[in-house]
Amino acid sequence: MASVLIALGGNVGDVRGTFRKAISNICGMAQAALLARSSDYATPPWGDEQQDPFINAAIEIETALDPHALLFTLHKIEKKFGRDRAQERRWGPRTLDLDIIAYGDEEFATPDLTVPHPRLFERAFVLVPLAEIAPDRLIAGQTPRTALAGLSAEGITRLDDLM
């Protein structure tokens, strides 16, 4: 079993509702146990800034799926919730984005998957939720807490918990 950190994001539709359903799907389809779930955060768009704000969160799961099987499963879940990777623009609006941030303590790069996520330490919108659930987890020699200390988290706001 591997401990996996997954980032969730979206800015189209009922994103928080989508997160709840997507996490349930991840646990079921990946035969995973949910170990931790961050709060939801409103975040400014990144890359393509001419769009609505995003909502971001992070989860930690435990799964026996290998990284590529998990990626395949996450892409199926994204599609189920309306994401069409072939038709969207880079960094553009989306209903659901699921990224494997860390898979155990593995480090590798293949044409379709790099672990840990290659831009993890550049993105406060990923690090803020990660620092909430795994502040001291060592990822590629850094922790979310220390990596976040070097970035601006301006514009990132924790959303109230849902009932």
Image (cartoon, grey):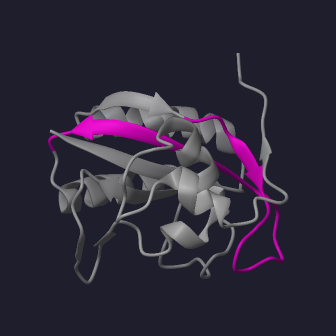
Q: 37 above or below 6?
A: above
Residue range in magenta is: 38-64
Q: Is residue 82 visible?
A: no
Q: Where residue 145 sits in the image (x, y, percent)?
A: 56, 51
**Residue 102 forms part of the magenta stretch:** no
Q: Where residue 8 sits in the image (x, y, percent)?
A: 54, 51
| Residue 16 appears left or right of 82 | right
Q: Residue furthest top?
A: 163
Q: Where residue 56 sits in the image (x, y, percent)?
A: 64, 50
**Residue 58 forms part of the magenta stretch:** yes
Q: Where residue 101 sits in the image (x, y, percent)?
A: 41, 58
Query: How many badges with numbers are in the image?
Result: 0
- Which of 142 and 78 lies nearest the eye of the viewer? 142
x 81%, y 70%: residue? 51
x 37%, y 28%: residue? 35
x 64%, y 34%: residue? 39
